[in-house]
Image (cartoon, grey):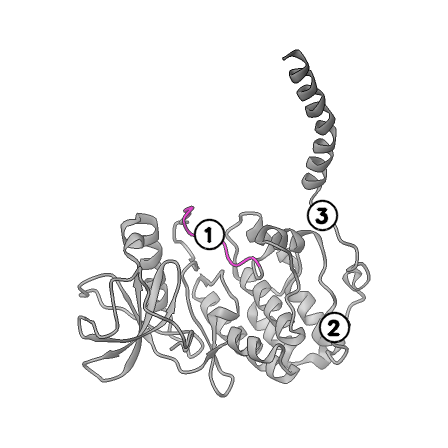
Amino acid sequence: MLQVSQAAHADEASPVRPGDQLDHYRIDAVAARSGMASIFRGTDLRTGKQVAIKVPHPEMESDPVLFDRFKREQDIGASLDHPGVMKVFKDDDRSQLYMVMEWVDGRLLRQILNDEKKLPPERAIKIAIGICGALDYIHTHGVVHRDLKPENIMVDGDDNIKLIDFGIAAQAGARRLTFAKLSNVMGTPEYISPEQVKGKRGDARTDIYALGVMLYEMLTGKEPFQGPNPFAIMNDRLLNNPIPPREIDPSISPQLQEIIYRAIERDPKNRYATAREFAWDLQHQDQVGAADRAELRDWKKRRTPWIRRVLFYIMLILIPVVIFGLMFFFARR
């Protein structure tokens, strides 16, 4: 798995260090770190095979909801078996809480985009079709990833993909877990769907939206919605339309641009209903009709949240009131 961070150092929050042994697994090196867990490259001493070992930080184990989230991620991973999804190996006899996954050689899509900025359409389409295949599988098995982004897509040397990190995934029939400590509980601002911004749990079309955003980014080298902070980014996606991909790169075909717009429709009922539909259009672009969309004309119109404007005007009204009040206060003294 994961050549996530070549320069990753041991996580001070983790009690596990390279050279330690967890049951029949040897810890070899740090692969990646997050706010909740450290991921190590390890060796299964029974088979000699490399594995990825995810060890939660101690404070995560002591939080009942975070503990449940980690267990759910493990259960979801262990229930899935698809070449486009990282496999999780479950074992109920472990001495402590940790997760063991297959080790996948390759690079994160984020690393590829950082190095290459944008991808040729043929390569971006191949990667997107691979992601569609994995999404179609997990969706038909009642799982929604909910945090689809380049950081959670592994790409091998042949551009085959694997979905990783089901940390905030939702499973049909499972109770909803909500908690304040996990800031990205509803997704990542750059890829979060409009319905998630509004506090809804999201369904398969949430992942389709995120993939549409990633396809936009792969083709243009830019994220469609931007802002100085996460809230501004999320507001931008609710109120404004992105720069049309062909405005950034005219070599992008009208059909491919239309596919992106169908994936990132603000209203989920207007998006692709399934990842299979998304993939079909990518594979049959000659049969995709490019609509005369309003988004292609009014994207330069930038709207700001009405509440912000209301607060601005309230502040303007209050300024002289506050000044008068201070003058009156000091005058009486």
Q: Which residue is mark 3?
A: 304
Q: Is residue 151 magenta?
A: no
The structure residue drawn at horizontal position 57% and vertical position 76%, both measured from the top left corner, is: 113
Quadrant housing residue 76 = bottom left
What span is in magenta? Answer: 178-189
Query: Is the residue under label 2 in contact with that under label 3 (CB below 8 Å)?
Result: no
Residue 183 belongs to magenta span: yes
Q: Which mark is residue 183?
A: 1
Residue 10's place in the image compared with 319, above or below, is below
Q: Residue at x 68, y 71 (%)?
A: 259
| Residue under pointer 2 | 248
- What distance separates the C-alpha of mark 3 from that of mark 2? 23 Å
Helix, strand or loop for disc 3: loop
Q: Is residue 36 left or right of residue 200?
A: left
Q: Is residue 48 left or right of residue 305?
A: left
Residue 55, position as x, y percentages in the image? 29, 64
Q: Are marks 1 and 3 in contact (CB under 8 Å)?
A: no
Q: Which of disc 2 and disc 3 is earlier in sequence?
A: 2
Q: Quadrant of the C terminus?
A: top right
Looking at the rendered structure, the kind of residue marked 2 is: Ile
